[in-house]
Protein backbone atom coordinates (compact mmCIF):
# COMPACT_ATOMS: atom_id res chain seq x y z
CA UNK A 1 0.00 0.00 0.00
CA UNK A 2 1.49 3.33 -1.12
CA UNK A 3 1.70 6.24 1.30
CA UNK A 4 -0.37 9.30 0.55
CA UNK A 5 -0.76 12.78 2.01
CA UNK A 6 -3.15 11.44 4.66
CA UNK A 7 -0.70 8.87 6.03
CA UNK A 8 -0.07 9.37 9.77
CA UNK A 9 3.49 8.87 11.02
CA UNK A 10 3.80 7.32 14.46
CA UNK A 11 6.50 8.46 16.90
CA UNK A 12 7.81 6.27 19.69
CA UNK A 13 9.55 7.43 22.85
CA UNK A 14 12.59 5.36 21.90
CA UNK A 15 13.00 7.50 18.75
CA UNK A 16 12.86 10.93 20.42
CA UNK A 17 15.03 12.87 22.81
CA UNK A 18 15.20 11.51 26.36
CA UNK A 19 13.39 13.70 28.87
CA UNK A 20 15.57 15.45 31.46
CA UNK A 21 12.59 15.76 33.85
CA UNK A 22 10.21 12.85 33.05
CA UNK A 23 7.76 13.86 35.78
CA UNK A 24 6.61 16.83 33.69
CA UNK A 25 6.11 14.91 30.46
CA UNK A 26 7.04 15.64 26.88
CA UNK A 27 4.32 18.26 26.43
CA UNK A 28 6.15 20.61 28.83
CA UNK A 29 9.37 20.08 26.89
CA UNK A 30 7.57 21.10 23.70
CA UNK A 31 6.20 24.19 25.43
CA UNK A 32 9.71 25.13 26.57
CA UNK A 33 11.15 24.66 23.07
CA UNK A 34 8.44 26.88 21.60
CA UNK A 35 9.01 29.47 24.33
CA UNK A 36 12.72 29.62 23.52
CA UNK A 37 11.88 30.60 19.93
CA UNK A 38 9.95 33.72 20.97
CA UNK A 39 12.19 36.64 19.86
CA UNK A 40 10.95 39.22 22.39
CA UNK A 41 12.61 38.73 25.80
CA UNK A 42 9.69 40.17 27.77
CA UNK A 43 7.16 37.89 26.07
CA UNK A 44 9.55 34.98 26.41
CA UNK A 45 9.83 35.62 30.14
CA UNK A 46 6.06 35.93 30.47
CA UNK A 47 5.58 32.60 28.71
CA UNK A 48 8.18 31.03 31.02
CA UNK A 49 6.09 32.06 34.03
CA UNK A 50 3.02 30.46 32.47
CA UNK A 51 4.92 27.22 31.92
CA UNK A 52 6.05 27.20 35.56
CA UNK A 53 2.39 27.41 36.64
CA UNK A 54 1.62 24.38 34.44
CA UNK A 55 4.54 22.53 36.01
CA UNK A 56 3.20 23.35 39.46
CA UNK A 57 -0.11 21.70 38.58
CA UNK A 58 1.61 18.65 37.13
CA UNK A 59 3.88 18.27 40.16
CA UNK A 60 1.82 19.39 43.20
CA UNK A 61 4.00 17.43 45.64
CA UNK A 62 6.70 20.05 45.07
CA UNK A 63 4.88 22.16 47.67
CA UNK A 64 6.19 19.79 50.32
CA UNK A 65 9.74 20.94 49.62
CA UNK A 66 11.43 24.01 50.99
CA UNK A 67 11.70 26.93 48.52
CA UNK A 68 9.40 25.04 46.16
CA UNK A 69 8.83 28.03 43.87
CA UNK A 70 12.53 28.37 43.18
CA UNK A 71 12.78 24.64 42.59
CA UNK A 72 10.14 24.89 39.86
CA UNK A 73 12.17 27.57 38.09
CA UNK A 74 15.28 25.41 38.50
CA UNK A 75 13.39 22.54 36.87
CA UNK A 76 12.42 24.83 34.00
CA UNK A 77 16.09 25.60 33.36
CA UNK A 78 16.94 21.91 33.55
CA UNK A 79 14.23 21.02 31.01
CA UNK A 80 15.61 23.72 28.72
CA UNK A 81 19.11 22.29 29.02
CA UNK A 82 20.15 25.45 30.92
CA UNK A 83 19.90 27.31 27.61
CA UNK A 84 17.33 29.89 28.66
CA UNK A 85 17.55 33.66 28.23
CA UNK A 86 14.72 35.05 30.36
CA UNK A 87 14.04 37.38 33.27
CA UNK A 88 13.40 34.92 36.09
CA UNK A 89 12.60 35.73 39.73
CA UNK A 90 15.50 33.51 40.83
CA UNK A 91 19.10 33.16 39.61
CA UNK A 92 19.72 30.47 37.03
CA UNK A 93 21.04 27.21 38.51
CA UNK A 94 24.60 26.19 37.71
CA UNK A 95 24.76 22.82 35.88
CA UNK A 96 28.02 21.84 37.60
CA UNK A 97 26.38 22.27 41.01
CA UNK A 98 23.10 20.55 40.11
CA UNK A 99 24.78 17.58 38.44
CA UNK A 100 27.52 17.16 41.04
CA UNK A 101 27.61 13.89 42.92
CA UNK A 102 27.19 13.93 46.71
CA UNK A 103 30.28 13.32 48.78
CA UNK A 104 30.87 9.69 49.61
CA UNK A 105 30.31 8.90 53.28
CA UNK A 106 33.23 6.82 54.51
CA UNK A 107 32.21 3.52 56.05
CA UNK A 108 33.78 2.20 59.21
CA UNK A 109 35.19 -1.13 58.08
CA UNK A 110 37.06 -1.82 61.31
CA UNK A 111 35.86 -5.14 62.76
CA UNK A 112 33.66 -4.93 65.86
CA UNK A 113 35.48 -6.44 68.82
CA UNK A 114 32.28 -7.64 70.54
CA UNK A 115 29.20 -7.80 68.34
CA UNK A 116 26.76 -8.31 71.19
CA UNK A 117 27.81 -4.91 72.57
CA UNK A 118 27.90 -3.06 69.25
CA UNK A 119 30.32 -0.52 67.78
CA UNK A 120 29.01 2.42 69.83
CA UNK A 121 30.31 0.81 73.02
CA UNK A 122 33.84 1.15 71.69
CA UNK A 123 33.30 4.88 71.12
CA UNK A 124 31.98 5.28 74.67
CA UNK A 125 34.99 3.42 76.05
CA UNK A 126 37.29 5.75 74.10
CA UNK A 127 35.51 8.70 75.70
CA UNK A 128 35.82 7.24 79.20
CA UNK A 129 39.50 6.45 78.62
CA UNK A 130 40.19 10.13 77.96
CA UNK A 131 38.46 11.19 81.20
CA UNK A 132 40.68 11.96 84.22
CA UNK A 133 40.50 9.66 87.21
CA UNK A 134 37.84 10.59 89.75
CA UNK A 135 34.23 10.21 90.76
CA UNK A 136 32.89 11.28 87.36
CA UNK A 137 34.92 8.62 85.55
CA UNK A 138 33.85 5.97 88.07
CA UNK A 139 30.20 6.92 87.55
CA UNK A 140 30.66 6.72 83.79
CA UNK A 141 32.22 3.25 84.09
CA UNK A 142 29.38 2.07 86.30
CA UNK A 143 26.69 3.36 83.89
CA UNK A 144 28.50 1.74 80.97
CA UNK A 145 28.79 -1.56 82.82
CA UNK A 146 25.05 -1.60 83.59
CA UNK A 147 24.24 -1.00 79.93
CA UNK A 148 26.73 -3.65 78.77
CA UNK A 149 25.25 -6.14 81.22
CA UNK A 150 21.82 -5.53 79.69
CA UNK A 151 23.18 -6.08 76.16
CA UNK A 152 25.02 -9.19 77.30
CA UNK A 153 21.87 -10.71 78.77
CA UNK A 154 19.90 -9.98 75.59
CA UNK A 155 22.18 -12.04 73.38
CA UNK A 156 23.81 -14.59 75.68
CA UNK A 157 22.30 -16.11 78.83
CA UNK A 158 20.13 -15.33 81.82
CA UNK A 159 22.88 -14.44 84.29
CA UNK A 160 26.30 -12.85 84.13
CA UNK A 161 28.78 -11.94 86.84
CA UNK A 162 29.71 -8.30 87.29
CA UNK A 163 33.35 -9.26 87.01
CA UNK A 164 32.73 -10.60 83.50
CA UNK A 165 31.42 -7.20 82.41
CA UNK A 166 34.33 -5.41 84.08
CA UNK A 167 36.82 -7.66 82.28
CA UNK A 168 35.11 -6.91 78.96
CA UNK A 169 35.45 -3.17 79.57
CA UNK A 170 39.15 -3.47 80.33
CA UNK A 171 39.68 -5.79 77.35
CA UNK A 172 37.80 -3.60 74.87
CA UNK A 173 39.69 -0.53 76.10
CA UNK A 174 43.01 -2.22 75.47
CA UNK A 175 43.99 -1.65 79.09
CA UNK A 176 43.27 2.08 79.00
CA UNK A 177 40.33 1.76 81.40
CA UNK A 178 40.69 0.06 84.76
CA UNK A 179 37.53 -0.67 86.74
CA UNK A 180 37.95 0.61 90.32
CA UNK A 181 38.18 -2.00 93.06
CA UNK A 182 34.95 -2.56 94.97
CA UNK A 183 32.69 -1.23 92.20
CA UNK A 184 29.32 -2.97 92.31
CA UNK A 185 26.36 -2.86 89.96
CA UNK A 186 22.75 -2.58 91.03
CA UNK A 187 20.96 -5.87 91.56
CA UNK A 188 18.70 -7.10 88.78
CA UNK A 189 15.01 -7.35 89.52
CA UNK A 190 13.49 -10.82 89.44
CA UNK A 191 11.00 -9.50 86.87
CA UNK A 192 13.72 -8.15 84.55
CA UNK A 193 13.28 -9.44 81.01
CA UNK A 194 15.98 -8.79 78.44
CA UNK A 195 14.49 -10.10 75.20
CA UNK A 196 16.02 -9.88 71.76
CA UNK A 197 14.48 -7.31 69.42
CA UNK A 198 11.32 -8.72 67.85
CA UNK A 199 10.96 -11.51 70.39
CA UNK A 200 8.20 -11.93 72.96
CA UNK A 201 5.77 -9.77 71.08
CA UNK A 202 2.96 -11.28 73.11
CA UNK A 203 0.47 -12.01 70.35
CA UNK A 204 -2.75 -13.19 71.94
CA UNK A 205 -1.64 -12.11 75.41
CA UNK A 206 -2.61 -8.46 75.37
CA UNK A 207 -3.13 -6.74 78.73
CA UNK A 208 -6.76 -6.57 79.70
CA UNK A 209 -7.67 -9.48 77.45
CA UNK A 210 -10.55 -11.83 78.12
CA UNK A 211 -8.43 -14.95 78.59
CA UNK A 212 -7.99 -17.89 76.23
CA UNK A 213 -10.67 -18.43 73.64
CA UNK A 214 -11.36 -21.29 71.30
CA UNK A 215 -11.58 -21.00 67.51
CA UNK A 216 -15.19 -19.78 67.78
CA UNK A 217 -14.21 -16.81 69.95
CA UNK A 218 -15.76 -18.34 73.10
CA UNK A 219 -13.93 -18.63 76.39
CA UNK A 220 -12.62 -22.06 77.22
CA UNK A 221 -14.46 -23.59 80.12
CA UNK A 222 -17.78 -25.06 81.11
CA UNK A 223 -21.04 -23.82 79.66
CA UNK A 224 -23.35 -21.95 81.97
Image (cartoon, grey):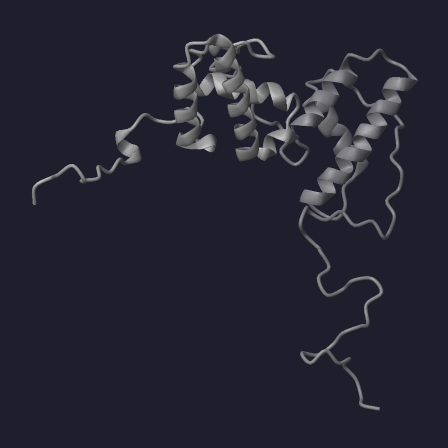
Where does the image place residue 112, in percent across and percent down from the top left?
60, 27
Identify the residue at image location x=48%, y=14%: 44
Residue at figure coordinates x 41%, y 31% from the top left: 27
Q: How many marks?
A: 0
Measuring from the top left, give residue 56's x and y in whole percent.
Answer: 57, 29
Quadrant of the frame with the C terminus:
bottom right
Q: Is residue 188 above or below residue 27?
A: below
Which residue is at the far right?
A: 135
Residue 109 is at least partly visible in this image: no
Q: Is residue 143 above or below residue 176?
A: below
Residue 124 locus on image (x, y percent) = 74, 22
Horizontal side, residue 86 vs residue 15: left or right: right
Q: Judge whether residue 175 can be spotted in this image.
A: yes
165 vs 74, left or right, is: right
Q: Is residue 1 left or right of residue 137?
A: left
Name the residue located 47 percent from the left edge and 15 percent from the top edge.
Answer: 99
Given residues 93 and 167, the one toward you in this image is 93
At 43% from the left and 18% from the top, the residue drawn is 35
Residue toward you, 169 or 52 = 52
Asked whether, in this view, residue 28 is left or right of residue 17, the answer is: right
Viewer-nearest residue: 11 or 114? 11
Extreme residue toward the left, this view: 1
For the N terminus, give its image quadrant. Answer: top left
Quadrant for residue 65, please give it.
top right
**Residue 28, image x and y in percent?**
44, 28
Seen as rendered, the residue at the extreme bottom is 224
Among the 4 quarters of the image, the one containing residue 30: top left
Amino acid sequence: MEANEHTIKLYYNTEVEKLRMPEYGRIVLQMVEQMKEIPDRAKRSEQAGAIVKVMERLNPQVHQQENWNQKLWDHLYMIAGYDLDIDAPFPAPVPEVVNSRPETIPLNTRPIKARHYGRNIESIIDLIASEPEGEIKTAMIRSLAIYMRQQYLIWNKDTVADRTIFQDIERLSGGRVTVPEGLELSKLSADANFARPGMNLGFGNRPGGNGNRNKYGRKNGKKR
